[in-house]
Amino acid sequence: MSDLTNKISSFLGGDYLGVEDIAASLSKQLGLVILCVQIAAAAIIFTLFNYQDVSDYDSSKYMIFRDIMVMLLLGFGYLMTFLEKYGLSSVGLTMLLTALNMECNLVVEGLLSGNRFISLDAIIDAEFSAATLLISFGALIGRATPLQMCALAIAQSVFYA
């Protein structure tokens, strides 16, 4: 540790926590939050939701779904790789937050609207919810921890609905 770090640490009255220590302490909490959200969402989807009929799916809606998903994962994910410190984590966090937000949005919108069918229209709407989250992520990358971003993903899926 440098002298400045020792002075700051002694002034604050605590031991210096390195980046590795902070990351290790947050990874357990992040994993627990993601696990709880996945279990809750799976339980709600499997018990309360149904799929729409296959005849209601058409190729034009699928192409819209595909194009928006490419924009979310490739567009937003690789857009933020220019950041020197956060380039590699931006791609992974983009994918994680997109999946988490879309899943929560499907559940929340289905419960609030009463339309408990998983259809391409509902998935496309969930993609737009994820797009609003990724815009916020672009403003917060490097300032918020992954745990805070997951909390924002859950909250923003509720407020988008």
Image (cartoon, rainbow, N blue to C red):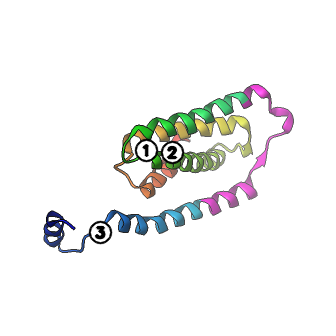
- Looking at the image, the residue that sits furthest to the front is 2
Point out which mark residue 87 bears: 1
Examine the residues drawn in magenta and state their main secondary structure.
helix
Q: Is residue 123 left or right of residue 76?
A: right
Q: Is residue 78 left or right of residue 6?
A: right
Q: Amino acid at mark 1?
A: Gly
Residue 103 seen from this side: yes
Q: Front-most of 88 and 131?
A: 88
Classed neighbour count for the residue bearing mark 2: other residues with Cα under 10 Å, few (<14), some (14–19), many (≥20)? some
Classed neighbour count for the residue bearing mark 1: other residues with Cα under 10 Å, few (<14), some (14–19), many (≥20)? some
Q: Are marks 2 and 1 in contact (CB under 8 Å)?
A: yes
Q: Is residue 136 left or right of residue 154?
A: left
Residue 142 x, y percent position in the rendering? 36, 48
**Which badge, 2 or 3, comes first in the chain's sequence?**
3
Q: Secondary structure at mark 3?
A: loop
Q: Amino acid at mark 2?
A: Val
Q: Which residues are magenta?
A: 38-62
Mark 2 lies on residue: 91
Q: Amino acid at mark 3?
A: Leu
**Which badge, 1 or 3, comes first in the chain's sequence?**
3
